[in-house]
């Protein structure tokens, strides 16, 4: 991403990881005309996303320098949704350190990590497997 683009990033959403969950978030942000930037560690995936016209930073979202290149200081929210609890935890810690007021949403695969993510500064923690299970049971008429 060019430096000139960085200046345009204000009151935006940072999406860390563009797997299944991240891609769905990106789709909804785009549908709602919300300005966003994606941080993707996989260079091939990042290239594909750039070809689709997205603002993408290739790098590790746990690093301050990468979050700063995504204008974390002026972001309104960050979604740390890589499929690795430890990376999400470090991303939350780093993001909170760089921007005390940014809204941080993340995912967890483990109840213990869910608590740790909240303690680290996450405002919202979702457990996709639990959510999916609840939805399926609801559709089956089981509470």
Image (cartoon, helix red, strand yellow):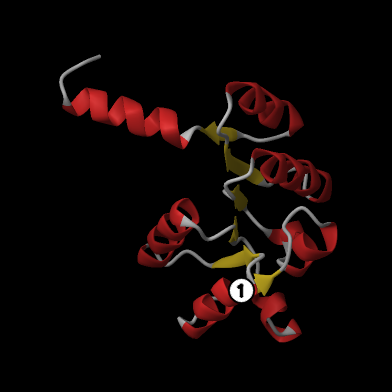
Residue 31, picture quadrant: bottom left
Q: Residues within 10 Å of mark 1 (few under 14, many from 20)?
A: many
Compared with 38, 108 (above or below) is above
Identify which residue is drawn at 81% across, 57% down: 63
Residue 4, picture quadrant: bottom right
Q: Nearer the viewer, residue 9 or 1?
A: 1
Which quarter of the rendered picture does the C terminus lie within?
Answer: top left
Identify which residue is drawn at 62% across, 53% down: 76
Compared with 31, 25 (above or below) is above
User: How many discs appear?
Assistant: 1
Q: Image check: 58 left or right of 97?
A: left
Compared with 97, 64 (above or below) is below
Camera sees residue 132: yes
Q: Image check: 103 left or right of 140?
A: right
**How far from the left and from the top, in percent, is residue 33?**
42, 67
**How far from the left and from the top, in percent, is residue 57?**
67, 72
Residue 105, picture quadrant: top right
Q: Residue furthest top?
A: 143
Considering the numbered disc 1 on the image, is that residue within a helix, a strand or a loop? strand
Which quarter of the rendered picture does the N terminus lie within?
Answer: bottom right
Identify which residue is drawn at 83% across, 45% down: 97
**How far from the left and from the top, in percent, is residue 92?**
72, 42
Camera sees residue 55: no
**How far from the left and from the top, in percent, is residue 107?**
56, 39
Q: Nearer the viewer, residue 72 or 92?
A: 92
Q: Image check: 36 left or right of 137?
A: right
> Mark 1 — residue?
56
Identify which residue is drawn at 62% across, 60% down: 11
């Amino acid at each position: 991403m060019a430096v000139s683009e960085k200046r345009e990033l204000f009151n935006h959403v940072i999406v860390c990881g563009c797997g299944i969950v991240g891609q769905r978030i990106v789709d909804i942000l785009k549908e709602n005309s919300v300005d966003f930037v994606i941080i993707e560690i996989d260079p091939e995936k990042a290239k594909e996303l750039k070809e689709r016209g997205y603002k993408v930073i290739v790098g590790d979202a746990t690093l301050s320098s990468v979050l700063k290149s995504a204008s974390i200081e002026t972001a309104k929210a960050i979604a740390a949704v890589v499929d690795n609890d430890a990376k999400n935890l470090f991303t939350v810690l780093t993001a909170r350190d760089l921007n005390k007021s940014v809204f941080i949403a993340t995912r967890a695969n483990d109840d213990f990590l869910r608590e740790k993510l909240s303690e680290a500064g996450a405002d919202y923690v979702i457990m996709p497997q639990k959510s999916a299970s609840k939805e399926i049971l609801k559709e089956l008429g089981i509470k």
